[in-house]
Amino acid sequence: MKRSLQDVLKDARAIVPEVSTDEVSGRLEQGMGETVLLDVREKEEFREGHLPDAISVPRGFLEIQIETAVPDRDTPIVAYCQGGTRSLIAGRALKEMGYTDVVSMAGGYGVWKGAGHPWTQDHQFTPDQLQRYSRHFLLPEVGEEGQAKLLDAKVLLIGAGGLGSPTAYYLAAAGVGTIGIVDDDTVDRSNLQRQILHTEERVGMPKVESAQLTLQGLNPDVKVVPYQQRISSENVMELFADYDIIVDGCDNFPTRYLVNDACVFLNKTNVHGSIFQFEGQTTVFKPHEGPCYRCLFPEPPPPGAAPSCAEAGVLGVLPGLIGCIQAVETVKLILGAGNGLMGRLLHLDTLSMEINTMKLRRDPECPVCGESPTITELIDYEEFCGLH
Amino acid sequence: MTVTIKLFAGLRSFAPEGSGDEVVLELPAGATANDAATALGIPQGHAGAAFINNERVDLDVTLSDGQVVGLIPPLGGG
């Protein structure tokens, strides 16, 4: 039996109620609660402008993506398209999938905009960016909104070494818009077994310069800001001020305590990574919400108790794993997606390939972030670690 | 009482030969995580942090019979 478009629409109207743009506008003004505004137009149409807070699931991807975008079948959904036809057909498909409360906005975005109701336009991506980040756009947790957040984010990496290399690589690839890198060192041939930002021909070059060459070669969207200096009590507050997230991939304890204290004082999240031979640790320190480094390790180890990679050796792949986890945590923080490692220490042993995730807690007696802090300004961290 | 001490990273070198990374220790009642570290010859300050049931506890926490206690040092490298 041949069926016309009118037949199809008639059937759809029988199971998907239509609401006017004015009714939707009224609901928007009262606060939508759990109601999802579902834009089923093509991505190009969505980019031109859409209802505030609408999510985009094009009709062609509806059945594939809707369960991720709207997991609860009882969530109220207001579907709309440009003229009210595609959303009606989409509504029927949603009903068939078991969504219980679906309506279609009659007249669609065309009537909505024409009536002077509010609309917004998202970040405008270049054609190159649409290609580059296309796999991110497919993820509801990232999407164009999340990619815009990544492009606007400013992340400062402490160290362009074993941990900083993979972190910087993946943050740049992900399109984190501004990546600052602090490192006063130059590339040594012994670094190349693990510090993948650098190359044989750059031996002797400042690491931050080598990092900048690599990262901008990978992604021209990224602004790399090199700081060829050693981080210290004198420069840390100024260095951190312009950044949203600090990623600690340094190689010594005075710097770890300095980074921690500065992050607490400036209320910056610190994505921690540290390694020894075959084992690594990573966590997220979010000041005043979760524990800080001092809540975990109140006292630095005695000098010589925790040897560096140069002294004890390190498996080249290890910082790749830990640095990648730091990159994942940083991206999640920027997106506001998933459960971060705040309050959890992940310890990885590559020899047994065992991962232990341990619960951390804030220490009410922490001298920096506790109830009655005794350290309220930066101190001499070399002295604190017993190094002079 | 008997406790099992699980050693991580650089602390593994303090495990008695042949015992692997998990060391079963006989300790007097009232012993702390610090006492367990000392019994293994771990110098003061090297242990870093203690964990019981995968939750961080203070090193001076009193241990109970049958507990598994993790000792984790801070790691320096990057």
Image (spheres, coloured by chain):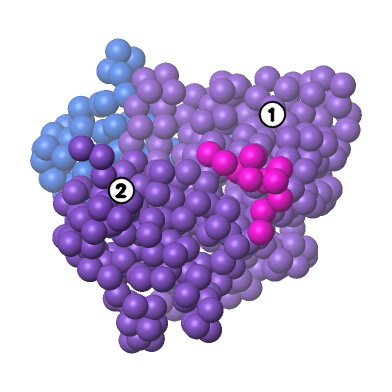
Of A153 and A8, the residue lying toward us: A8
Which dot marks residue A4? 2
Residue A128 position in % (x across, y down): 71, 43
Of A189 and A89, the residue lying toward us: A89
Chain of the residue displaying label 1: A
The correct choice, above or below, for A278 with respect to A268 in the image is above
Residue linked to disc 1? A195
Asked if labels 1 and 2 share a chain, the reply is yes
Chain of the residue displaying label 2: A
Residue at 35% across, 32% down = A355
The secondary structure that dominates the magenta segment is: helix
The correct choice, above or below, for B3 with respect to A245 in the image is above
Q: Secondary structure at mark 1?
A: loop
Crowd class of label 2 (few under 14; some 14 to 19; many from 20; radius 10 Å): few
Residue type at mark 2? Answer: Ser
The first of marks 1 and 2 along the sequence is: 2
The correct choice, above or below, for A224 with respect to A29 in the image is above
Instruction: Kindly indicate which chain is depicted in purple in the rendered structure.
Output: A
Q: Is residue A69 at all visible to an observer of this figure?
A: yes
Residue A80 position in % (x across, y down): 39, 64
Q: Colour of chain B?
A: blue
Residue range corresponding to the magenta coloring: A124-135
- Nearer the viewer's eye, disc 1 or disc 2? 2
Q: On the rendered structure, is A44 left or right of A186?
A: left
> Looking at this rendering, what residue extends furthest in the top direction?
B18
Residue at 30% across, 48% down = A4
Q: Secondary structure at mark 2?
A: loop
Asked if residue A243 is among those painted magenta in the image, a careful observer would answer no
